[in-house]
Image (spheres, rainbow, N blue to C red):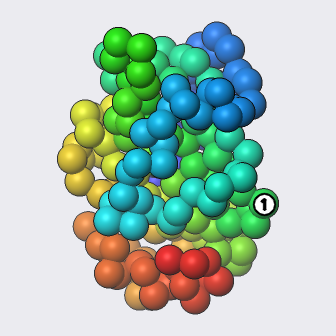
Amino acid sequence: MNSFFLFFIATTVWGCSFVDTQVLGSKGEEKFADLYKIDRKALGFTEIPKGSKLFITYESGGDAYDAVVSVILSNTKSRRRVYFKKIDDEYKWVGEQESILSGKLFDSVDGLVQESLDISFEKKRMFGSKEGKTNIYYSGNDPRLKNKHDLTISDVAPIIREWGIEY
């Protein structure tokens, strides 16, 4: 299991000190205006559709971040966490992690797990990925991606589209 996926689970379930979690409404979205200013396509992420369920969690990520927006999509093929640092009275985008799921299962040392592509970008090193660079990790048995390191957007874009996701 790759380190990105383990971190994603750890921060979601165990590792963070949750202070306050709430659904992000239009008033809250003003504080997190950077959420829609990022050129996600250039960074390798799928778009966040307007009307997605957004949950904000105020948590401490040390010097790296102060709040996390979790994006829940109705198609359940994408899970995302968007990280923000509070600067003055605004929350500025500092990184993002997205897991894109194919819907296929494969047998791993952990049993049956879902094939996925994990994409991350960190302005400042937060979780062990290379900072200032799109990092893409694959979990599955597709020979086009399996055991390949330093995957690029052009490597994975056709496969994400094969999985039925607009990309």
- Residue 119 quadrant: bottom left
Front residue of 152/87: it is 87
Q: Residue at 71% across / 33% down in the picture?
A: 25
Q: Residue at 63% across / 67% down in the picture?
A: 101
Residue on which the image places disc 1? 74
Q: Tell me, yes or no, if residue 12 can be seen here.
A: no
Relative side of 49 to 145, left or right: right
Relative side of 107 to 126, left or right: right
Q: Amino acid at mark 1?
A: Ser
Q: Callout 1: few (<14), some (14-19), or many (20+) C-alpha neighbours within 10 Å? A: few
Q: Secondary structure at mark 1?
A: loop
Q: Position of residue 20 (x, y in %)?
A: 68, 14
Q: Residue at 51% across / 65% down in the picture?
A: 46
Q: Position of residue 113 (x, y in %)?
A: 68, 64
Relative side of 22 to 29, left or right: right
Picture layout, residue 32 above or below residue 17: below
Picture layout, residue 37 above or below residue 137: above
